[in-house]
Amino acid sequence: MLSAVFFGICFFASIIGVICGLGGGVIIKPALDAFHVMDVATISFLSGCTVLSMAGYSVAKSRFRGKSGIDRKIGLPLALGAAFGGLAGKWLFSCLLALSEDKNKIGAVQASCLLAVTAGALLYTVFKEKIVSKRVESRTACAWIGFFLGVLSSFLGIGGGPINLVVLYYFFSMSTKTAAENSLYIIFFSQTASLLSYIVTRSVPDFDIHILMIMMIGGILGGVCGKILNKKISDKTVGRLFIAFMGVIICINIYNIMIYLE
């Protein structure tokens, strides 16, 4: 039963993740937290691996077909910055785990940060037509922006999610679908770096390999379906889906904060 629930969450989250560029983790992480069947470190690790599998599939598929919307001059510095940010985010998370005796407090911190990020992304999306966006071209600036996104991605265990899209909208004036594709590219690099850090530092938490496989299969299948659906819907519909699920995620995080602080 638990396996079926985990599969369903990852499958559904990855469909939305690919369509909107959220990465899926922004839905998977808080949804699994709400069940309270694992500690926060294990959920962060499993969520990160699932997001990596989905993002990896999506990036590979785009490159194989030769229809990538990624601008190398911008995308590569962003991705490399995100990789180093992923390492920094993993280090920050490990430090907080080591310093805190109550792991629930870490869960509350993650949920609070995710709530703030999601609420900010929702507000920006609603009012973005009134906000003048930029066109950053400096590779150094791109690398630092990517680093910031990587830190959040790794620390929160969400892949990057809404903050990636907001940053890509504002700093690079990208369309919704182009931002979604570039977001997945950044997520792939940041989560790869985070996973390698887990392995090198031997800090991989104890987990059920069966659950991980179920989650990764759900993530990849969701990525496949998301790619198909993404071709059939407009930018406007993608924007509406994004706003709707930001509202859902905000509610889940408020619930998680209350439970963790009990």
Image (spheres, grey):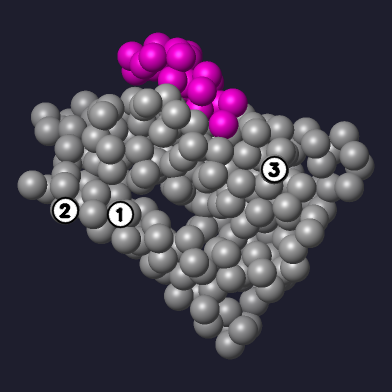
Residue contact between numbered discs 1 and 2, judged by CB atoms under 8 Å: no
- The answer to whether 143 appears left or right of 181 in the picture is left
- What residue would you read off at disc 2? 258
Residue nearer the viewer, 31 or 261: 31
Q: How many residues crowd around disc 1 within 10 Å: few (fewer than 14), some, or many (20 or more)?
A: many
Q: Main secondary structure of the magenta part?
A: helix
Q: Could you say which disc has been placed on residue 202 in the image?
A: none
Residue at the limit of the structure toward the front, as seen here = 1
- What residue would you read off at disc 1? 253
Q: Secondary structure at mark 2?
A: helix
Residue at the limit of the structure toward the left, as seen here = 262
Q: Residue at x 52, y 78 (%)?
A: 126
Three-letter code, disc 3: Cys
Q: Tell me where the magenta segment starts and ends, as one range.
A: 191-218
Q: Residue at x 29, y 50 (%)?
A: 111
Q: Secondary structure at mark 3?
A: helix
Q: How many residues crowd around disc 3 within 10 Å: few (fewer than 14), some, or many (20 or more)?
A: some
Tell which circle, 1 or 3, labels the residue nearer the N-terminal end. 3
Residue nearer the viewer, 181 or 72: 181
- What residue would you read off at disc 3? 225
- The answer to whether 132 appears left or right of 38 in the picture is right
